Amino acid sequence: MIESSKGINRGLTKKDIKDLINEDKDHECDGIGRDKICVRIVAIADLPSQHGQFQTVAFYNNRDNKEHAALLHGNVINQEDVIVRLHSECLTGDVFGSLRCDCHDQLTSALSTIGKSKAGILIYLRQEGRGIGFINKIKAYALQEEGLDTKEANIALGFRDDEREYSVAAHIIRSLKIRSVRLMTNNPHKITDLEQYGIKITERIPLVIKPNKYNRFYLETKEKEFGHLLEGVAKRFQEQMDIPLFKKIK
Ligand SMILES: [Zn+2]
Ligand SMILES: [Zn+2]
């Protein structure tokens, strides 16, 4: 049990944690998705953060030893309408605060919403650079500096436009016994992806990004239509593939 600013937030109890780890100890299924991924809960611990009180779950993955993570707020076991955010790892954005994408803003905005919710999780998927890996992502950035856009750069490197997939997230949602999900996304494809793996989605919550010095430029570019503006922003900020929504500036 961990405390939140608004009284007691009943996160996973010691017993919940013990049970989840014990039940998953010998878990093995056929796996889901293209790569037949199966994950197991291995360890859970408290993680107080700038964005609220969380517990973090470490998953073993049968395919490629990528250690996926989930950050939980509140007790999500057997709950309906749990807020879920899928975030794909972005070293340059998440850690270095890169402005080539909006991953850092999306991550902090999602964590702050989840941190205030009754029950929510952020699933941190270790698929750097939309699945192409860090070296290739930096190669793609270099190609963009030669004038190619994100998509063209990835194709030039021999990858499909987007190598990510969400079967592992679906498995994680099941491992944590979440019954239904309010998915935090601006990208309807994530909903269909998860639904195809049997996840029940009751609502889509848009992810609104606070404007910063960098993206404010786009918002203040009045010569263009709003639709065109979003298109331009999306092209620059494509990594999470969620077209950003911005708060209106007065
Ligand atoms: Zn499995
Ligand atoms: Zn990024």
Image (spheres, helix red, strand yellow):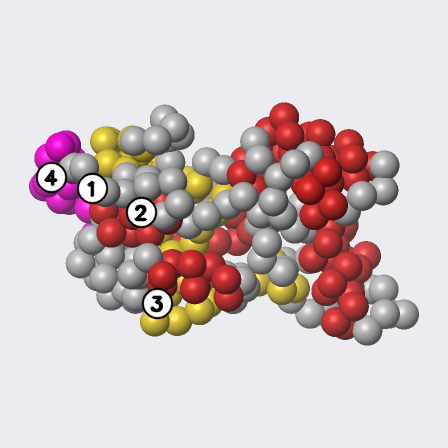
Mark with earlier residue (4, 2): 4
Sort mark 3 into few (<14), some (14-19) or many (20+) by Cα contacts within 10 Å.
Answer: many
Q: Residues within 10 Å of mark 2 (few under 14, many from 20)?
A: some
Highlighted range, magenta: 9-26
Query: Is label 1 in a helix, a strand or a loop?
Result: loop
| Residue placed under numbered mark 1 in the picture | 29
Spatial distance from mark 4 to mark 2, Cα to Cα? Answer: 19 Å
Q: Which mark is residue 227?
A: none
Q: Is mark 2 within 8 Å of ligand 1?
A: yes
Q: Nearer the viewer, residue 50 or 167?
A: 167
Q: Where, quadrant-wise, is the C terminus in this rendering?
A: bottom right
Q: Could you give the CA–CA distance between mark 2 and mark 3, rounded to whole angstroms?
A: 18 Å
Q: Secondary structure at mark 3?
A: strand
Instruction: Tell whether label 3 touches label 2 (CB within 8 Å).
Output: no
**Residue at 53% over, 39% down:** 131
**Residue at x 85% of width, y 64% of height:** 221
The kind of secondary structure the magenta stretch mainly shows is: helix
Q: Residues within 10 Å of mark 1 (few under 14, many from 20)?
A: few
Dot 1 beta carbon under 8 Å from ligand 1: yes
Q: Judge left or right: residue 130 versus residue 212.
A: left
Task: Depth check: give the residue in front, 65 or 116.
Answer: 65
Q: Which residue carries the number 3 mark?
A: 201
For the residues labelled 4 and 1, the Cα–Cα distance comes to 13 Å
The kind of residue on which mark 2 rests is: Ile
Sequence order check: which comes first, mark 2 or mark 3?
A: 2
